[in-house]
Amino acid sequence: MGFYEWLKGEADAEWRAYVEHPFTTAMADGSLPQPAFRRYLVQDYLFLIEFARAYALAAYKAPQLSDMREAAAALSAILDVEMNLHVKLCAGWGLSPDDLERAPPAPEMLAYTRYVLDTGMRGDLLGLKVALAPCVIGYAEIGNRLAATAGVGAENPYRVWIDEYAGAAYQEVARKARADLDRLAERYATPARETELLAIFKEATRLEADFWEMGWRVGKEM
């Protein structure tokens, strides 16, 4: 069993609450209220900016040149590819770049991204990658689960989002992230650090679930 699979198994309750959150299930059958999704899209744009900072920090924390190059490639992918795709997706939902730039950050977005950055600042590259893993790898698992749901037809308004994370390109991103995490763990994880690293993974996963809950509350209030 790889290190990532061990983390996920030990954090089963937190992980299931995240990847099976009602927000995601409602996306699969198309029942998610669209204002809830728009709320998520806006905050996810702000989230990507902070995650870019996390990968810049990963480059600084990198103990080897290969790690630095991996972090730089991920930073470039967020700034030069993923954010442009996100802006395009938001435009399809009636959200302009100005809407995204002017939006105030939600407490849930701040809590999660500040936790990731603080973990990276206080610790090493392995700890930072553990904090990043629920997002980077979890979205691939969510995308696969939703794509396999019978309700995801061409008329589903969330089909583009689901296809993006279930697609081969993102699945490969997640595969590389798992391999990278396992490789770092082989180098730097010790029995004495297991409790610390598992606590980071559980907290990051819980904060990811809170991010879904942020949007889900908008739908429940309607």
Image (spheres, helix red, strand yellow):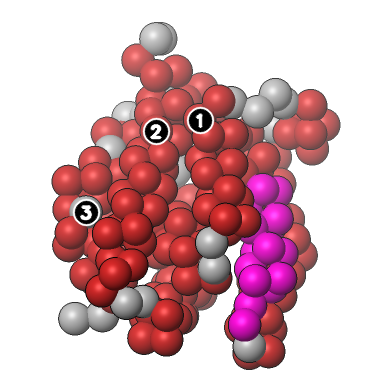
Q: Is residue 116 above or below residue 69?
A: above
Position in image of residue 96 (x %, y %): 76, 34
Pointer 3 local density, CA inside 10 Å: few below 14, some 14–19, many at least 20: some
Q: Nearer the viewer, residue 143 or 129?
A: 129
Position in image of residue 169 (x %, y %): 51, 74
The outermost residue toward the top is 222
Q: Which mark is residue 108?
A: 1
The residue indicated by pointer 2 is 210
Secondary-structure class at tag 2: helix
Residue under the image location 65 percent in, 71 percent down: 61
The residue indicated by pointer 3 is 11
Amino acid type assigned to the residue bearing label 1 in the image? Glu
- Which span is picked out in magenta? 49-63
Disc 2 versus disc 1: distance between alpha carbons? 6 Å
Secondary-structure class at tag 3: loop
**Do the residues bearing badges 2 and 1 touch, measured as CB atoms within 8 Å?**
yes
Q: Quadrant of the N terminus?
A: bottom left
Q: Quadrant of residue 84?
A: bottom right
Q: Is residue 162 above or below residue 137?
A: above
Amino acid type assigned to the residue bearing label 3 in the image? Ala
Disc 1 versus disc 3: distance between alpha carbons? 20 Å
Amino acid type assigned to the residue bearing label 2 in the image? Asp
Residue under the image location 63 percent in, 78 percent down: 62
Disc 3 versus disc 2: distance between alpha carbons? 16 Å
> Of callouts 1 and 3, which one flags the residue occurring earlier in the amino acid sequence?
3
Pointer 1 local density, CA inside 10 Å: few below 14, some 14–19, many at least 20: some
> Of callouts 2 and 1, which one flags the residue occurring earlier in the amino acid sequence?
1
Task: Examine the rendering and report whether any part of residue 136 can be seen.
Answer: no
